[in-house]
Image (cartoon, rainbow, N blue to C red):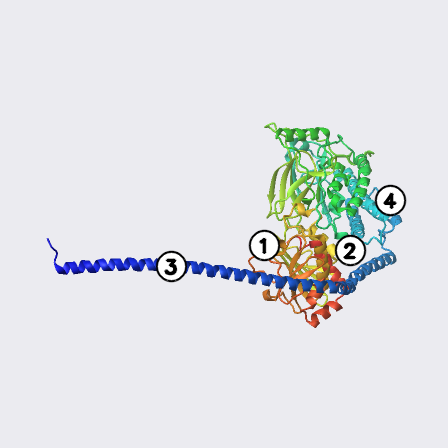
Amino acid sequence: MELPNCIKIILTFVLFSIIANMKSGGKGGKSKKEREAKLRAEAQLRAEQEEAERLERERLYQEHLAKLEAKYQVERESELAELHSLEQKFLSAQQWKMDYREQAKWEHYLSCDGTPDPTVPQEINTFMSLWRDDHDEDVQLVMEKEEVVLNLIEKFEYLLLEASPDEITEKQRDQYLEFILQLQDLLHQKYNEATQNLLKTASMYEDSETGNMHTVIKNKNSTFCIWVNLKKKARLKNFVFQGAGHAFDLPKSLALSSVAVRVLHTRYDHLSPLWVQCQGLPRQEASDTRDLAEHPKDSGKERGEDEEEKGEEEPSVPAAEETSSQGRKESAASLKENSNNTDDVKETEEKTEQNSDTLDVPSQEEDALLQEEAGGRGEAPQVADLQQLVPLGGVYHIAALQLPPQVQDVGDWSMVELLDVGLEVYPYSPDKAEDGTQAAVQITLRLPDNVIYFQMPVVARWDPAGQQWRTDGISNITYEAEEKSITLGMGAFYTVALLQDAHLNLPYQAWELHPAGVDEGLFTVTAVFATIQIQIKDNQCMLASVVVEKEEVLSHITGKWMSPFALRAALKRAGVNIFPAEYSPKYVPVPRKAALAEVKAYEQMALLAPAFAFAHSKWNGEAGPEQVVFKVSEHLTAGSAKDNDWSLYMFSGEKVQTLKLTETSEAFSGELEEESEFHSTLYHMLKDSASSEAMDRVERAGFLFIDSVYQLLLATRVLAYS
């Protein structure tokens, strides 16, 4: 059947359209491939051009750096000479301190106040000899003399840590260390003698309600609490010392015995090794701080860790003190070696101070019970690492004492039997509880109000045989932060201390130093738990504020002017330790910094502090061990610098440069800021862009202010621990 013509025409048209479209599509596909090839060629050309431009820029930049390096080398000698003239201010400060100490010595001589001059051995020996021969003192008199002793020890420590080698010889240094040990021994001996004198007449002061005797005597340095069990009634086995806050709960056997319980809280620590007690500011000379960033050598085990504990049943105080005297003499030598080589801190800990706290020596039976108890739990006795944990708030000497014969009234006479044995500990053997375990003595201690415990403290007991703090033998610890008290159980009577992590406020979150007037500055350190502001003026420092959780604390030391040395000691005693030690890198995870860069930076920052503000940079940790990075801003007005006023500088101790980097940059780069140069000193770098008024302030700044700033920077080491 033949199709109509109209349909044939339509089919022919469609067929031609399809053929045309196919031809058109083939041509289009061919042109697309050509375009893609062309685009690839253009992209490759652009990449080659960009790489060529980058290489050219790099070549020009390297040529520019080479020119700057050549200029830096030419000007280096003259810049260092100019800086050296400024650094004479440090020597002037050192000379002023020497003259000040000489003047103080002369004024002390003229005062004739009866206290010995610590630099005159004859006076110290006479003072100790006369006091040692006086056996009739009471507790109150010992506390009065205690203030003199503590002042003498503080002066010895100041001389050991601050005096230059030109002022004291090695022989004098050894002698001062020995005097510290002897004064500590004598003070504790006198407390024991006064306790014995009080116990002889205890029956004369019995309480009308309980029939027992108790008293609390305290001053700013110590709190003396004693309870004498005269009636020996089981229902009177616990007691709270009113006015002190300390309390105890005795096992039944002790409640029925002629025993006295003494709690002597000294707000100082004369038991820990001297290297713990006498940590001070580093030497002022940069050469003495070369090892600032070095790790201490790892030594063997702690002393006493593998030694069998030794003790005597019913030891008398004088006999045990005599036994420990030789060890204390050896400790002075070990501390001297430690002061000459800070890398041997661990070794010093093994050899250091022996102390005569004989009331804390448990009997052999008690020691065996403790070892058996520890072994039954599968736990080894723990020795406190005093590089990481430090006693805070003083020491609590807790002892059970034998009652000496009491005064008897015979007619008109009062008679007492005298025993030439000295103060004796009570021969206490721990009871067994109903469940067969060892019955513990329960003690509640009131924590000092002027100390901050940022975390629950670690309770440790003093081990006189091993000369170390240990955490075994103490159980059932309950810490009440709000009430500022801690309750614990002990298998025997021990001297205990509360330890706190020495590094819990490290690393710093931020820091800033800026001028606050002529020869005045404000140093702010934001630590982990606290923000500390220190005002600096001439050779004095003042704690402006310590803020913890938006609340100002430590009012007892804020607002008082003192030396940098004294401020450091006051903050550490209060629990705010922002002063790293030589061994701190083992416990604080911060990038290491070369001592040369760090110390030189502190020196030059101090010289420029009268007119420039310095602050923490987040890029300091990214710059590597050989460089330090910090922010700087010219600062001639009151208040902190604004965010856009800061510039970043990188310093190696020998070369300084301005960084193109900002605090908001995405990644660290050591690229040089445009139109800036290399300099040998921070002083000359800032001089390029500083105002004449700023540099005039730097030139006219007092050497005492500069030295105080340097001491604080060196003590806090903000460039290494932030």
Q: CA distance from mark 2 to mark 1?
A: 38 Å
Tag 2–tag 3 contact (CB < 8 Å): no
Q: Nearer the viewer, mark 1 or mark 3?
A: 3
Extreme residue in the right direction: 122
The mark nearer the N terminus, 4 or 3, is: 3
Determine the secondary structure under disc 2.
loop
Report the amino acid beneath label 1. Glu
Check the image and name the residue furthest to the front: 2
| Local secondary structure at mark 3 | helix
Residue receiving disc 1: 549
| Mark toward the viewer: 4 or 3 | 3
Q: Could one spot residue 599 in this view of the protein?
A: yes
From the viewer's side, name the closer residue of 4 and 236.
4
Amino acid found under the numbered disc labelled 4: Ser
Inspect the image, locate mark 3, and give the three-letter code of the amino acid beneath it: Lys
Percent coordinates x, y for residue 365 in the rendering: 71, 28
Quarter of the image that includes the C terminus: bottom right
For marks 1 and 4 on the same chain, the one whose residue lies earlier in the sequence: 4
Quarter holding residue 131: top right
Question: Which marked residue is nearer to the observer: mark 1 or mark 4?
Answer: 1
Measuring from the top left, give residue 528's x and y in whole percent. 61, 52
Of the two numbered discs 4 and 2 on the same chain, state the one appearing first in sequence.
Answer: 4
Q: Which residue is mark 4?
A: 129
Whether tag 4 and tag 3 are in contact, CB under 8 A, the answer is: no
The percent coordinates of residue 218 (x first, y second) are 72, 48
Residue denoted by label 2:
285
Front in this rendered view, residue 137 or 519 = 519
Percent x, y for residue 613? Answer: 66, 64
Q: Which mark is residue 32?
A: 3
**Label located before the other in sequence (2 or 1):** 2
Comes first in the chain, label 2 or label 3: 3
Q: Secondary structure at mark 1?
A: loop
